[in-house]
Amino acid sequence: MSVLALREITKTFPGVVANERVSMSLDAGEIVALLGENGAGKSTLMNVAYGLLAADSGEVLVDGEPVRIRSPRDAIAVGIGMVHQHFMLVQPFTVTENIVLGQEPGRFGVIDFAEARKRVREISERNGLEVDPDARIADLSVGMQQRVEILKALYRGARILILDEPTAVLTPQEVRELFEVLRALVDSGLAIVLITHKLDEVMLAADRVIVMRDGRVVGETTPSVTDERGLARLMVGRDVVLRVERGSPHPGDVLLEVDDLVVDDERGLQAVRGVGLKVRGGEIVGIAGVDGNGQRELVEAIVGLRRPKSGRISLKGREITHAPVRETIAAGVSHVPEDRQRRGLVLQFDLAENLILGDHARPPVATFGVVHRKVVEDIAERRIRDYDVRTPSWRVLAGNLSGGNQQKLVLARELGRDPELLVTAQPTRGLDVGAIEFVHRRILAERDEGKAVLMVSMELDEVMALSDRILVMYRGEFVAEFAAGEADAERIGLFMTGGTTREAEAAVAGGGAG
Amino acid sequence: MLSEVINPELFASAIRMATPLALAAIGGTICERSGVVNIALEGIMLIGAFFGVVVALAAGSTHISWLVAASPWLGILAAVVASVLMAGLHAFASITLRMDQVVSGTAINLLALGLTGFLMVTLYGHPGTTDPIPVAINAVFNFPTPAGGLLATAWSWIDQIVFSYTPIVYAAMIAAVVGQWALFHTRWGLHLRALGEHPRAADTVGIRVLRGRYVAVLISGVLGGLAGANLSIEQVGSFNENMTAGRGFIALAANIFGRWTPIGSYLASLLFGFADALQIKLQAFQSVVQIPVQFFLMLPYVLTVVVLAGVMGRAVAPAEVGKPYEKE
Ligand SMILES: Nc1ncnc2c1ncn2[C@@H]1O[C@H](COP(=O)(O)OP(=O)(O)OP(=O)(O)O)[C@@H](O)[C@H]1O
Ligand SMILES: [Mg+2]
């Protein structure tokens, strides 16, 4: 008998049927991957199961018994836990405080912190999820924070664990560790639902795959009888090119030049330590590196969001080191930030308003400070169509789009502006395979039109697939540079984690020299 | 001249002056930790100060002797009740109706000022100051002063700085210590802090966000009421129009300077109280040093601005303070 069963779940939003009579079930001891295009209704379905959204109709059964889940409280009570893509952790609290929050041990309202710490240590050891119970969340890496989220669910006795795109923000090493932990959990009797867009992860981790499209379940398969290509076809309904063809580049004049740039992070520590780089028109320069090695600060300094300590940035020979964002935009710089929700969009604005941000003060959108609504709507409709943003209309608020469609919205605005230089961080985070193919083609098209592209990505595959030159960033410095042909994942990976040239050569020669 | 300024009376006066600030600041701390900005403290205090005196006067002018004797205590009770009602209004507007919390607070301050002014005239037939309350509240302790000698001097320092106060002054000290402990050692405190930092996270683990915020605002009403009663009943013995004179705002500054902790709020209030006490002492020398009295009066407010300018930016407020919470 399945531990969790969803029966005929229907959920509509104004103008959208997010789930249409969806049924699925989950057994103890298995990992089920939920796969589907952006906007297919995966998050909606899981939010219904966890009580964050109320379904219009349909039933949830736990251990074969129908249950009423009206809030996460009810879900926790029947043993359902969920790890959201946007973590539900109190930043200034310790790991222990976050895990026990709401169910603290103690008497007469006084918390027994020693007991709390002991219990946290117990479940963390039992499940192979090592954490420091006394560390503050704000000081932890994203991967560690995710562990805390999982521990939080386990502390509450979860037998069913839902993870919504847990790997989107993790390093490859962290992804491997996560899958080991998940495997151990299902071996001990849990049931897990895993939402992801990465087909290789599905092949690696899932026991069963359920595919959704347009709010419906359209297929079910197992990794043993299919491959990534097959999964992609099931998902998108056509053959998807997983790695786009790229012609050879025709580099032109230097468009972006960065000299000896030093940038501090929020805490006043040096994040970028005197780096220099050049990007020519007609070329894509990729920056590879483990998250938190100064990439974010570098990008923000270039686009004018952060004041460099020293150094020089120029665009087409004109210095823009301290130019305000409005001027860098006017000079032809577009920016796709890594955090679409915090920096890329105004979630409470509608799609049309979001799509003209940055152009809002210039003709044709505005003249003499007056915005022309008709022009805005035309632009919005065109960009939504061109970038396949799945939405009933531009009147929808950006916050109501699915994660991947929010990303497409940012891309539509920044590329739609027809920039000279595109600076992008994690351009395809949260996108489905079809959308990734599309975005990769667009970025290559920009290059072929003679635009300069600077791309930061944690996805090594993506960096290698698109870049004409690859820079590896480690601790605020560029530690290696590769031309498109000569890079291999292993060597780059070594530099990313602080290896030296000699080690890299040894590793590559390793097969022969021992 | 120095001993005329620096004497035990100065320190005792500083602690007295700090008391209404500290109570309001601790109330502000609890509110903001839960995610609600309480600009309304000024009005909450003023309402408390007013209704405290109204009830103390009414009870004190009867001919029932126990009622007369209890009149200042009934006044304090009335102050607390009135302030809690006023705080409830702020809670309703900003938590249930999800109004902008600064707008709601400002509205309440204006309401309190207008209402007390209007009721002054309606009840007593004149604006300005009420009659003095007939029965005052005495110091809690009353030890005999020993005669002469060094020991007597030492004793007079201790007696004045430690044992010379009325009950609410001690209540403020207790509120600081108990509040600090509760905030960091009890379930209530942990939940309260979670509400101000990440209400959705609190919600998903079963903590009731709106109820928790209501409780916090109402507690600040109790503390604000005590602060008002301390001003009008304990310190002055009557009510003057707008007698809080910006103390609600200074209290918010003290809360920030105290880094959103009850004991920190108390200590910061002491600093402001000291400035106030010093200012009053120095006024006596006005004719000697030829500085206009307004200059001295300005001191606590200037100190507020300086302190805030210095501390702001570095002190970290609860992440979600000021934002109404809405379920998905
Ligand atoms: N709160 C909301 N209001 C209105 N529409 C919504 C809301 N939440 C989701 N939708 C719509 O429901 C549909 C399904 O969204 P959902 O977030 O479930 O997609 P998803 O499969 O998780 O996609 P992604 O892979 O991009 O995260 C989308 O069209 C989305 O725009
Ligand atoms: Mg989603």
Image (tube, rainbow, N blue to C red):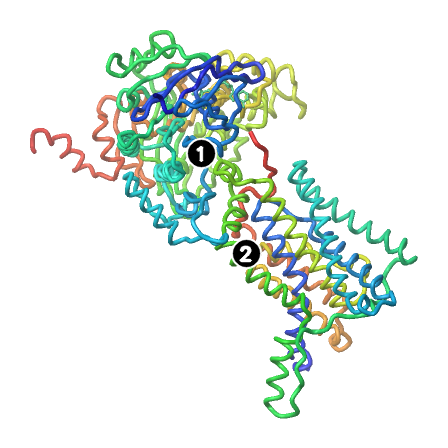
Q: Point out which mark residue B261 bears.
A: 2
- State which quadrant residue A84 falls in: top left
Residue at x 63%, y 44% (from the top left corner): B214
| Label 1 within 8 A of ligand 2 by Cβ | no
Q: Is residue B134 left or right of residue A392?
A: right
Callout 1, which amino acid?
Answer: Ile
Picture layout, residue A143 above or below residue B67: above
Q: Report x, y in % for residue A317.
A: 43, 30
Q: Is mark 2 within 8 Å of ligand 1?
A: no
Q: Secondary structure at mark 2?
A: loop
Q: Crowding at label 1, few (<14), some or many (≥20) Cα neighbours within 10 Å?
A: many
Which type of secondary structure does the marked residue at label 1 adopt? helix
Q: Are marks 2 and 1 on the same chain?
A: no
Q: Is residue A165 left or right of residue A371?
A: left
Residue A236 higher or lower than B22, as above or below: above
The amino acid at mark 2 is Thr
Q: Residues within 10 Å of mark 2 (few under 14, many from 20)?
A: many
Give me the residue at 41% from left, 12% from top: A217
Chain letter of the residue carrying label 2: B
Residue at left offset 28%, top offset 24%:
A205
Name the quadrant of the C terminus of chain A.
top left
Q: Which residue is mark 1?
A: A76
Q: Quadrant of the N terminus of chain A?
A: top left
Residue farthest left in this picture: A513
Question: Where, by quadrant of the figure, is residue A204 drawn?
Answer: top left
Residue A233 rendering spot, x and y as whole percentages: 34, 9
Q: Nearer the viewer, residue A323 or A112?
A: A112
Chain of the residue under label 1: A
The picture places residue A250, in percent across and down from the top left corner, at 33, 17
